[in-house]
Amino acid sequence: MEQSSFWTHPLVETAGYFSVFMLCLIVAMVIFEIVTKYKNWEEIQKGNVAVALATGGKIFGVANIFRYSIENHDSLPVMIGWGLFGFLLLILAYFLFEFLTPKFNIDAEIERDNRSVGFISLILSVGLSYVIGASIS
């Protein structure tokens, strides 16, 4: 097997995209842990469904953005760049969500296990991931 065909083999490409995505997802989750006022994984361990919904939405959102990036960009660096750009837009949307709801604090409501707010956060992350993904295609 030629060296160039090794790197373009679908199994090798899939493993590469998977590995890079997992690393980017870990970084994304660390960033989300920093920008939220509560500790995501501690709250989930305590059974906080609102945090689980919001966190699940973020994970899905990041994965969906990277899905679009993988589908539409044929080199790993370009895929990473567009995926990270999409992720930054998702974080911006998180701050806009907080800003656009001045009657209550999103983080505080999610930390209090307000499942309605957690669900809206999930839907916002998922919905925006489709819009962001389509725009980076």
Image (cartoon, grey):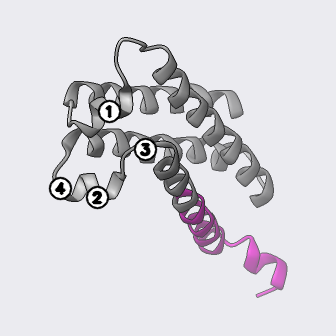
Give how far across and how far down residue 41 sits, in percent.
Answer: 32, 58
Range covered by the magenta-colored residues: 1-25
- One can see residue 118 in this view: no
Q: Quadrant of residue 116?
A: top left
Tell me the element at label 3. helix
Sequence-first tag of 3 and 4:
4
Relative depth, front residue between 100 and 13: 100
Foreground label between 2 and 3: 2
Q: Is residue 18 left or right of residue 102?
A: right
Q: Pointer 2 and pointer 1: residues touching (CB < 8 Å)?
A: no
Which quadrant of the rendered structure holds the N terminus? bottom right
The total number of labels drawn is 4
Secondary structure of the residue carrying tag 1 is helix
Answer whether residue 9 is visible to the viewer in this image.
yes
Disc 1 to disc 3, C-alpha distance? 22 Å
Is the residue under label 3 in contact with that under label 1 (CB below 8 Å)? no
Name the residue tied to disc 3: 60
Residue picked out by circle 4: 46
* Residue named by callout 1: 108
At x 46%, y 51%, the residue is: 33
Residue drawn at (43%, 48%) of the image: 59
Mark identifier at residue 42: 2
- As measured in the structure, the alpha-carbon distance from the residue carrying label 2 to the one carrying label 3 is 20 Å
Q: Judging from the image, what secondary structure is the residue with disc 4 in?
A: loop
